[in-house]
Image (tube, rainbow, N blue to C red):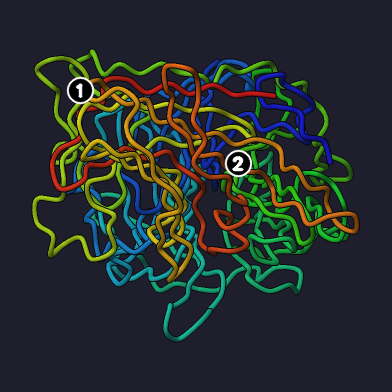
Amino acid sequence: MSETPRRDGGNSSTTPVVPGFFPDPTICRVGEDYYLAHSSFEYFPGVPVWHSRDLLNWTQIGHIFTRRSQFPRGDGRPSSGLYAGTLRHHDGRFWYVTTNAGDYDGGQILVHAEDPAGPWSEPVRVPDAIGIDPDIAWDETGQCYLTWKAMSFTDGEVGILQSRLDVTTGKIEPPYPVWQGSGMGAVESPHLYQVEDTWYLVLAEGGTERGHTATVARGPRPSGPFEGCPHNPVLTHRSTIHPTQNIGHADLVRTPDGAWAAVYLGARPRGSTPGFHVLGRETFLAGVDWQDGWPVFHEDQYQVPTVSTAFDERFDGTDLHERWIVPGGEVATTTEPAPAGGARVLPAADPSVDQDGSVGLLCTRVRDLRWTAEATVEGSGRFLLRLDHRHHYGLTVRGGTVEATARVGDLDVVLASAPVPEPGRPAVLRLTAESPASAPVPLGDAGPDTIVLAFVGPDGPVELARLDGRYLSTEVASGFTGRVLVLAATEVPAHVRRVTYQPRP
């Protein structure tokens, strides 16, 4: 499989337009402008929003959920929080509907804004629609339809339901079943569209793993009756050796010239069988044609341009960059400006609400397969590569010593330690993801990458450990998120002067 670094761009079938942990894409267009949003699970602020004029170059313009009154923390479990949603524009206003799995019995939540960059409203709750993956669509009369995957985490799946929705009150009429897919399991993520006089219902089937697909049906009304496409699934890489896997969860958009495109999620597994994806589910782009009244996806239609994912963060502004997020906590209680420059990352103020160690972490998504990141820390602090609270590698500096640590499930160990090379001066902690030394099977047992833990001394990097990256993958740890870089305190605040991130071949 190709290991071409993300910064070189590439074909849209193998190169995401938004790389890294940005799953469950949903898209809408207003005039010449496209807007894109993603699920974000336990991380806050929640649901990043992007803007583009060409579907290929995307700039993040904010988050939809920026206040805890919109998005209560819940129990803070990994891969809980804000699940997949739908972004739409109707009657001069942007709408986003989603599920907070940390408040699951509260039903769906609907927010709106005049500007997609925010601020977004307080949520309108839809308590009678229990489940995930809600969609909203309006007909010619202005009637809004809510379509969702009805299910319970304790009682199991019900199926795809639909109801008329009052967007001001959250009241729905008695729900009714619509098309339940082509026969595969895990039928979810409905999106409803009107194309001329026909209504189309696009679903995901097969689960968001290797069997993932997109399927479609059409009917005369939002409620159907629907007939499935004879060529379903219309989008999948199941049972192939394509370097992009898990594809599905598609959302269609019409371009200003009347053509069509779709965004969808995919993963880039690497290493020996079964393959390990570490960046989470990413956002890909496809062209869409219509043949005999059915959408046909062209995954390789676009050439994705070079995108800069590198950054040099010195925390010299009054507000944090949009890249910084926290799992389960609050940005305001996690970090503060340091009087001497940089940022102070604070320990959890109340350890009783930090049972899984997710509070007090300042994070940013890893967006490349190969990269090097450095954190300059004055005094004590931690610099980690994290998938969740039970799967992370990292470096800790305190008391004049740098330690390399690894947490894999119930194993939590110190791998090596060394004295700080220049006591009294900031320590430069380095994390690197590089290609594994071993070949894939049958010649070797390669993981997706090798993670190198080091610090930078006067004579260059001092390596403390080299670790197999497969243990920080979804295939090992489970869940729906991807890797993040983490700044964290020890028992006292961490003073971080600088963080750099650079993709590498």
User: Real-space Cα distance between discs 2 and 1?
Assistant: 42 Å
- Left or right, 490 with respect to 462, comes to left
Residue linked to disc 2: 282
Give the residue displayed 79% in from the left and 60% down from the top.
Answer: 273
Q: Residue at x 59, y 64 (%)?
A: 476
Residue 448 percent across, percent down from the top left:
69, 47
Q: The residue tagged with tag 1: helix, strand or loop?
A: loop
Figure quadrant of the C terminus: top right
Q: Which residue is mark 1?
A: 424
Q: Nearer the viewer, mark 2 or mark 1?
A: 1
- Give the mark nearest the N terminus, 2 or 1: 2
Label 1 neighbourhood size at 10 Å, few (<14), some (14-19), many (20+)?
few
Q: Amino acid at mark 2?
A: Glu
Query: In x, y percent, where is residue 305?
Result: 69, 16
Residue 130 placement, left or right of 280: left
Q: Is residue 472 above or below residue 344?
A: below
Q: Would residue 350 appear left or right of 200 to someone viewing this image?
A: left
Q: Which residue is at 12% across, 65% downward?
A: 352
- Of 51 and 110, nearer the camera is 51
Which quarter of the picture shows residue 433? top right
**Snapshot quadrant of residue 180:** bottom right
Q: Position of residue 475 (x, y in %)?
A: 63, 62
Left or right of residue 162: residue 109 = left
Camera sees residue 288: no
- Nearest the camera: 182 or 15? 15
Image quarter of residue 420: top left
Q: Quadrant of the N terminus?
A: top right
